[in-house]
Image (cartoon, rainbow, N blue to C red):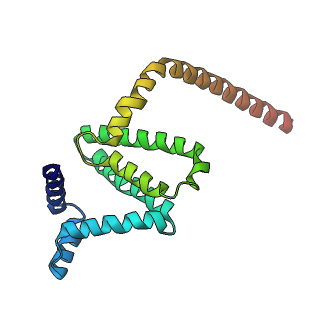
Amino acid sequence: MAASVQAYRDDIEKALREDKFWTRPLALIEAKTGVKRIYTFFGVIVFVSLYLVFGYGAQLICNGIGFLYPAYCSMKAVESPNKEDDTRWLIYWVVFAFFTLCEFFSNILMGWFPFYWLIKCMFLVWCFAPIQSNGSLFIYSKIIRPRFLKHEHTVDDILDQATDLAGKAAKAAAKHSIDNAFNKSE
């Protein structure tokens, strides 16, 4: 157990030294205060966690964490030649949308659950975590994908019928508008 905790700590320490947007601020704090960057990182985690439980605007902070970093990484992925990262981030957004849809219907329960924003934030971080099998890949492969494959053809048929119906309605509306325009001018 202690060895696995130390391995996670070493992985975090290594990630905090990689050339990312957080490297420069953490290095500056470490140089000015003498506090190792891993302790600064854990301090920020504790502060954000407490704020998500007791702070004002916890919903905004939580949704910002779940949106801003993934959106930035998604845009970088789209601009990179590697398409594997595009797929990874697209899966995150499918899970994010699925979770948001489920969350809408459980909105009444959120007021009764004091740690909701903290748990939601932890869930979203797990979903976009830069690890091999993060939460979004797990949820997509175990929950969303099997149901999608099971109902794909039915949904495609319904969408095709709706598209045909919408096209016919648009043509009828255009014809009706043109007929009315010519009838008014006479």
The residue sitting at 47% across, 42% down in the picture is 99
Q: Would residue 170 appear left or right of 32 to someone viewing this image?
A: right
Q: Residue at the bottom extreme?
A: 32
Q: Position of residue 106 (x, y in %)?
A: 58, 45
User: Which quadrant is the C terminus positioned in?
Assistant: top right
* Most foreground residue, 23 or 81: 23
Number of on-image labels: 0
Look at 35% across and 30% down and name the residue there: 141
Along the line of sight, the residue nearer the viewer: 141 or 6? 6
Image spot of residue 2 (x, y percent): 15, 53
Residue nearest the viewer, comparing 152 with 146: 146
Give the residue drawn at x 24%, y 70%: 40
> Is residue 128 found left or right of 147 in the rendered image?
left
Above or below, 86 relative to 33: above
Q: Is residue 13 above or below residue 74?
A: below
Q: Is residue 75 above or below residue 94?
A: below
Residue 140 location (% of width, % of height):
37, 34
Q: At 75% from the left edge and 33% from the top edge, which residue is drawn?
A: 178
Task: Name the outermost residue toward the front.
Answer: 1
- Report x, y in % for residue 10: 13, 56
Q: Residue 81: which quarter of the image?
A: top left
Residue in front for this viewpoint, 48 or 178:
48
Q: Is residue 10 above or below residue 22?
A: above
Does residue 83 appear in the picture of this structure?
no
Residue 176 appears in the figure: yes
